Amino acid sequence: MDAKDVLTIKTADKFEENWNVFSKKVKELIQSGKEKYIIQKDKGAAFQTEAIDIIIDLNPDYPVAVMLKYIIRFFNKRNSEDLLKIAHYAQIAWTEQMYREEWEKV
């Protein structure tokens, strides 16, 4: 990315383009970690559990705590990948909250 891109990155007309790049990077991050954290590696299994699923069952606020970890690390190291991880854990927290809200309606 050159200086020109950095200067125009905040403009409204670049929002959709920037969002597409950002969401693609988050998706790549999620996909790269998917195989690492699967507990049940049997490809024929009806479902595959990741460690995060068990951790959230034990502590539903875990994703928010992990976001805080990456926020602090970002301020210390300024690593853009930490921002992607924050977004990933925000998505996990959001999804869990949606499930909780739907469950409460039942």
Image (cartoon, helix red, strand yellow):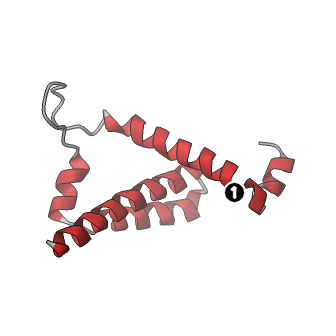
| Above or below for 19 versus 72 | above
In this view, the residue in front, 106 or 36, is 106
Q: Quadrant of the C terminus?
A: bottom left
Quadrant of res 50: top left
| Few, some or many residues within 10 Å of mark 1 (<14, 14–19, 20+) | few
Q: Position of residue 61 (x, y in %)?
A: 27, 69
Q: Secondary structure at mark 1?
A: helix
Drawn side of residue 29 relative to residue 75, left or right: left
Q: Which residue is mark 1?
A: 15
Q: Position of residue 18 (x, y in %)?
A: 67, 51
Amino acid on which the number 1 mark rests in the picture: Phe
Drawn side of residue 2 relative to residue 72, left or right: right
Work out whether residue 10 can be spotted. no
Q: Position of residue 42 (x, y in %)?
A: 15, 26
Which residue is drawn at the image coordinates 17% and 53% (left, top)? 54
Which residue is drawn at the image coordinates 40% and 58% (left, top)? 91
Work out whether residue 34 can be spotted. yes
Quadrant of res 39: top left
Toward the right, the furthest residue is 4
Which residue is drawn at the image coordinates 21% and 52% (left, top)? 53
Toward the front, the furthest residue is 106
Quadrant of res 15: bottom right
Q: Position of residue 92 (x, y in %)?
A: 35, 57
